Image (cartoon, rainbow, N blue to C red):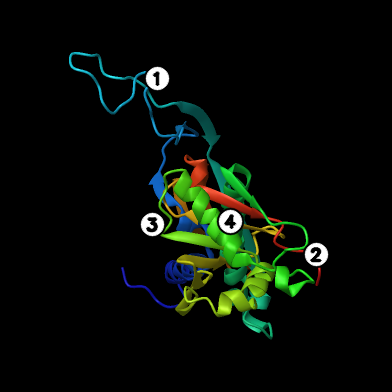
Amino acid sequence: MVSYPEQVDLRAENIDKLIKAIALQEYRMKQVCSINTSSSFIETYYREDNVELVGATGEAIRGVPRLAEFPYAEPNWTKVQSYIEKYAFSSTISYEDELLANIDVISRSLLRVGRAVANAVDQQIFAVLNDGAGNTVTVAVGSEWNSGTVANRDPIQNVLHAKRLLYEDNYDPDGNETYLILNPKDYSSILGNAKVISNPTFKASDVVSNGVVGKICGLKLLVSNVVSVSGALVVIAKEGITWKQAVPLTVVTEEKKGISKTVKAYEMGVPQLTAPNTVVKIKNTDSGAA
């Protein structure tokens, strides 16, 4: 079938590509997740205890005597259930606004629809990471990253403490892709810190992509407005959190000839934190000062 520019199928295809391209650039938290497909409304998974297995008292793994039974232990799992959720948003543009408005209403509406869905997904992924973090580093009062006493600010040590906790739980933040996730205010504070700027591990990104703006102590800096005030996260990407995707981002265009055009975007999924100790929360990073 021959298609002409004014036909709905071509416009719908262009809108679909535009919104998906916008959303792809707006997602921040999804890049720390592994992506698995789902075909169930209820997703069940088992959260494994990360403590190394050892033999019982008097049954060391090393030095097992001749003819003795092997020391025995088994890992522990906790059953967790989560429910697939739908993330959706729409915008309607009148026929008159599409033709006669002083701004490009279509382009702006597509931008806002794509961003709305991506932001809602990011908010939930962050909430799961933040609420389920297996360990916490608490910055002392008076030593916040924007403390009035400049000499007390030591974000490098706070970040290194978080990395130490990951190592102590048998995870390798340097051997895997690991992120330091920040809100814009903490990002400003940490980048303005003399100990950071002069630290040989600091590197500005050659290309800014999906909120990734540099590296500190081997960690990628990821900045997002969904991150709560006075807190940051150190997360080993794709190790302990999964986005269970039932329906990928989908775009639908509904047109009423001469009346309006409605653009809808939606996806379905749920984030699952299967290994909480791959996440360390850094608390009290902000003193409350402007």
Front residue of 198 and 111: 198
Q: Residues within 10 Å of mark 1 (few under 14, many from 20)?
A: few
**CA separation in Å, label 4 and label 2:** 19 Å
* Left or right: 101 in relation to 72: right
**Labels 2 and 1: the sequence-earlier one:** 1
Residue 88 visible, this angle: no
Q: Quadrant of residue 118?
A: bottom right
**Labels 3 and 2: the sequence-earlier one:** 3
Q: Which mark is residue 288?
A: 2
Counting from the top left corner in percent of width and height, residue 243 is at 47, 47
The amino acid marked with disc number 4 is: Leu
**CA separation in Å, label 1 and label 3:** 32 Å
* Left or right: 176 in relation to 108: left
**Residue under circle 3?**
176
The amino acid marked with disc number 3 is: Asn
Q: Which mark is residue 210?
A: none
**CA separation in Å, label 3 and label 2:** 33 Å
The amino acid marked with disc number 2 is: Gly
Residue 235 visible, this angle: yes
Where is the C terminus found, in terms of image quarters? bottom right
As helix, strand or loop, the secondary structure at mark 3 comes to loop
**Labels 1 and 4: the sequence-earlier one:** 1
Vertical relation: 96 (above or below) 132: below
| Mark 4 and mark 2 residues within 8 Å of each other at the beta carbon | no
Front residue of 194 and 244: 194
Which one is in front in this view, the residue at disc 2 or the one at disc 1?
1
**Labels 1 and 3: the sequence-earlier one:** 1
Q: Residue furthest left?
A: 66
Counting from the top left corner in percent of width and height, residue 174 is at 40, 59
Q: Residues within 10 Å of mark 2 (few under 14, many from 20)?
A: few
Front residue of 215 and 247: 215
Q: Which mark is residue 56?
A: 1
